[in-house]
Image (spheres, rainbow, N blue to C red):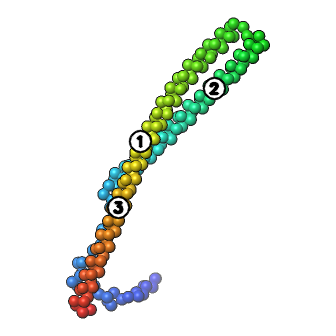
Amino acid sequence: MFAKPQLLFQESAYPRPRALKGVYRRMKKFAFTLQTVLEYKLTVEKTQKAALAAAEALLRELYAEDKILDETFLRNSDARERELREKTADAQSLAAYDTFFRRLSEEKKALAVRIEQAEMAKLRCQEALILTMKELKAYNKLRDKQYQEYLKDVAAEEEKELGDIISFSVATGK
């Protein structure tokens, strides 16, 4: 079906020396010793980013609600002043405006407390995320350092094996 590819170098031309048959080993793979911790921290980082995004979304909603309360206050304040200028306001409507503005003021104070709590929650999320990111940076630096050591070990091992092959070739005269 398919033609057998022709080898550029025949295996028989370069036989493996019998004395070195057991010497050839596979190089070990790089394995970061703290890989599971690194993966856990990456998961924690994703969770914290999601929590921060949720806190920011809540804060945006609260600020939007605060803006609506401000606009409502301005509209009703303008309406009350217009009634006072036109002298169409009676005692009952003034009392209703007074009650409405008091309730609006209480809502605004409660909203200010909720906004402050949301800002504190956002700040805590940011601090936790920053701490996790610093830890991740440290783990990545450690991983890079371990990888560089691994590369040095591999190079030294290859150099040793080449030296063994060369010394065997010289000793046997091949």
Residue found 40% across the figure and 49% down from its top? 134
In the displayed image of the protein, which residue is found farthest to the right? Answer: 86
- Residue 23, labelled with which disc? none
Q: Which residue is mark 1?
A: 128
Q: Is residue 163 left or right of residue 66?
A: left
Image quarter of residue 169: bottom left
| Tag 1: amino acid | Ala
| Tag 3: amino acid | Lys
In the displayed image of the protein, which residue is found farthest to the top? Answer: 91
Residue found 40% across the figure and 46% down from its top? 132
Find out whether the residues at labels 1 and 3 contact each other: C-beta distance under 8 Å.
no
Q: Is residue 34 above or below residue 110?
A: below
Where is residue 126 shown, x and y percent of the image?
Answer: 45, 41
Front residue (pair 71, 13): 71
SS label for mark 1: helix
N-terminal label among 2 and 1: 2
| Tag 2: amino acid | Asp
**Residue 44 appears anywhere in the view:** no
Q: Which residue is mark 2?
A: 70
**Residue 150 appears anywhere in the view:** yes
Q: Is residue 104 above or below residue 25?
A: above
Image quarter of residue 27: bottom left
Where is residue 46 shown, x and y percent of the image?
Answer: 44, 47
